[in-house]
Amino acid sequence: MSAVEVLRLPLTVDLSGFIALLQRLEVPYRVSEESGEQVLWVPGAQLAEQVRGLYQRFPDGDPHFQLQQEVPQAAPRAGILAQLMASRVTSLVLLLTLVVAGLTNLGDNFSVIRWLSFQDFQIQGDYIYFSTLDEGLAAGQWWRLVTPMLIHFGILHLAMNAMWFWELGRRIEARQGGPVLLVLTLGFSLVSDYAQYLSSGPSLFGGLSGVLYGLLGHCWVFQRLAPCPAYRLPSGVMAMMLVWLLVCLSGLITALGFGAIANGAHVGGLAAGCATGLLGGALARLRR
């Protein structure tokens, strides 16, 4: 089902109340910025007509809950499909992550992992021997700079990272578009992987968490400079993630036997995300 344009409004118009109403009614939507305007999209012409009528009645939303569930909803399967189609880059990254999880048996198949890790390695007995980064790059294996984000060790590691990427990725894709999300994802992966390499030296690491801290920092700083509904995260999310980062940096998680934490990747990703959020938010603020 293709997306249909519902509204095209100046950036100065505050859509946050109406967006909150759509979220309450569980209407699938996305908001993009095009040529200095904000554009609201929904899947299907029939739903678009209903949402236009809804905006005429409640342009500022429905803070007093005068409106009940009046907008007919698509079947659950159609709703999920519409969300996937509206967030193609987010869905593609998660699909690749799931495929790699299957191929690597969630971190147990080292014969596959060695082709995706930051550095190639060989296992001999109880020891792991890494090739140098320069050797891999000289051999044209540039993909290693970003593919560690697809490697996950265990179902919990995969589930938590996938859930957060779905939440944050869709927000950025709706606000700034799929190409921007793809560039940010690859860029944060590159920065966080290299930061982890610099902090720990040759080691086996992976996961989307460095990218997630980048996306989180991007949304947080962008929202501070140019507030928009898509980047308005639930209160306490940023504080919780920063507290978790500090706990990991303290070494407590490793000391409790839960495995090594890629702290370098988390810090590097967060710093890169704050930088891109500062740049993107400043540009959006100037356009307004």
Image (cartoon, grey):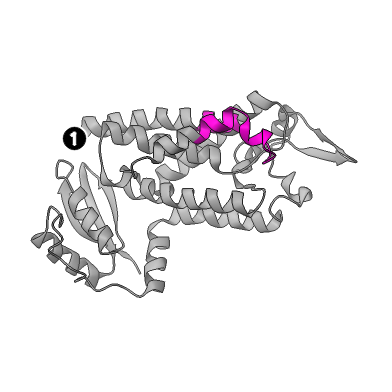
**In this view, which residue lies farthest toward the front?**
256
Q: Mark 1 sits on what residue?
A: 288
Q: Position of residue 125 (x, y in %)?
A: 90, 41
Residue nearest the viewer, comparing 94 with 176: 94
Residue 245 is a magenta residue = yes
Q: Locate residue 111, reporting x and y percent.
A: 79, 49
Q: Nearer the viewer, residue 266 or 100?
A: 266
Hey, which residue is sitting farthest left in the picture?
57
Residue type, mark 1 in image? Arg
Residue 121: % across, % down: 79, 38
Q: What residue range appears in magenta?
A: 244-269
- In front here: 263 or 288? 263
Q: Main secondary structure of the magenta part?
A: helix
Decide which of 78, 60 is in the foreground and name it. Answer: 60
Secondary element at tag 1 = loop
Quadrant containing the N terminus is bottom left
- Viewer can see residue 261: no
**Count of numbered circles in the view:** 1
Q: Is residue 283 above or below residue 148?
A: above
Q: Residue 273: which quarter of the image?
A: top left
Does residue 251 appear to the left or right of 230 in the view shown?
A: right
Q: Is 45 situated left or right of 238 in this image?
A: left
Quarter where residue 37 is shown: top left
Q: Is residue 152 visible?
A: yes
